[in-house]
Amino acid sequence: MRELLFLVHRLPYPPDKGDKIRSWHMLQYLSRHFRVHLGCFIDDDDDWRHAKAVASLCASTRFIGLRRGAARWRAAQALLARQAMSVHYYRDARLLQWVDGVISSGKVRHAVAYSGPMAQYIDGSAGRSLHRVIDFVDVDSDKWRQYGDSKPWPLSQLYRHEARLLLQYERHIAQQFTAASFVSPAEAALFRQCAPMARRKTGHFNNGVDAVYFAPAAAAAAPGPYAPGAQVLVFTGAMDYWPNIDAVQWFVRHVWPALRRQFPQLQFYIVGSRPAPAVTALARVAGVTVTGKVPDIRPYLAGAALAVAPLRIARGVQNKVLEAMAMGKIVLATPQALEGIAAQPGLELLLARDDIEFIHHAARVLCKQRDGDGGAAIGAAARQLVLQDHDWEKNLQGLGAMLGLGGGGPGAGRPAGQGAARPAREAST
């Protein structure tokens, strides 16, 4: 079996947030076709207990503990060097030494870097002999641009500076590597505009959803978190992530008061780990609950009248939207939250461009559900779209094609098969 170097910025387990979901399924797929040498950082002390399970899929591993304080200091030093802070944040001499040792063995001929900053470890002379694939996932430089547009000075200036430098780095990596991958056709198209010199190397493979785990009946056996007859709107996500923080703050400030006046018993649940102080403060608003980490998000989705995704800053594909759709829920989302998802508003979900449309659509659904119309048609269509477009077994063939395994691109090729037992899930980013 051929050997492959896989570099990831965060331990790809448990798959409880967006980046880990994708990297975990990639690791499972790669381990069926290669002897995988995995190098990655661990930035959560609790994740060390999962290292052994991840290592069982690999020929060798190198796990590096990432201390966020030290990483932020490295990022700050990048400003003096006029280099991207994101790249310096993940720069580590120990991992570089291990990577050089793996390559110098002469056995590895393929490499996959997951997320742009991890490409730095195979960007030197030793890496040029490899068949290198970079899975950027999102156009991160554009996300920093959005941050810059949404923040006051001086942060706006800092984030725009990072956007420019990171785009230069992304262009360089895409030109040097064999192939560059993204999470959706929309992300790939955006990058082709940003880096036209690498357009022929740029492709994508869609994220998937475990549609057996996230199924309408999957949460039936679990105790429901809501009181009988309660009408609930739910938002799921990692609540220390700025786009999610911004989304729920905007929703509570601009949408929630009008809905609460019309439906005095309505509740809004914010479900996700590590809520920032700005999020926990929202629990002081009447009808708003901030749960923090929960063992299983499915009961919170299953019992909700609506899953809302009021994101104003977004890139790539929102797993929170796909998971709710897989469970047959009506999703009410902004255009930003739907990028990369080929759903038809009004048929498979509901689209709201501003607070007025959010209030209108939510009130209409709540009134219908109060009258006995549960929105089954939209929920069924949503799940069918997920089954059609977001099947991991099919979509990972796109990665295989980039590595020369055959298949014919995203959504084509032989099934990838089943992986390890499904872990407990929480909120994804």
Image (tube, rainbow, N blue to C red):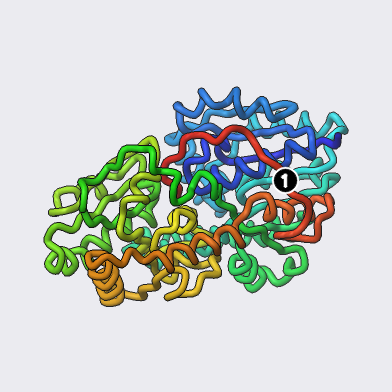
User: Above or below — where is 300 with respect to 153?
Assistant: above
Q: Residue at x 59, y 39 (%)?
A: 91
Q: Observer-nearest residue: 171 or 400? A: 400
Q: Out of 349 and 292, give the one closest to the viewer.
A: 349
Task: Report the side of 90 relative to 122 (left or right).
Answer: left
Q: Nearer the viewer, residue 29 or 218?
A: 218
- With respect to residue 147, does 239 lie above or below? above
Tell me: 332 left or right of 70: left
Please tell me in which quadrant of the rendered image residue 312 appears: bottom left
Q: Position of residue 289 (x, y in %)?
A: 22, 47
Amino acid type for the residue under numbered disc 1: Ala
Q: Which quadrant of the structure image shows residue 203?
A: bottom right
User: Which residue is drawn at the image coordinates 59% and 57% (left, top)?
Assistant: 390
- The residue lying toward the viewer, choosing from 379 and 235, is 379
Q: Where is residue 132 in the image (x, y as percent from the top left)?
A: 77, 49
Tally of marks: 1
- Residue shown at 44%/64% (left/top)? 337
Residue 4 visible (yes or no): yes
Give the residue number, with chain letter if any, for mark 1.
416
| Mark 1 residue element | loop
Q: Can residue 316 be seen in this view?
A: no
How packed mark 1 is, by other alpha carbons closer than 10 Å (few <14, some 14-19, many 20 or more), is some
Q: Residue furthest front?
A: 372
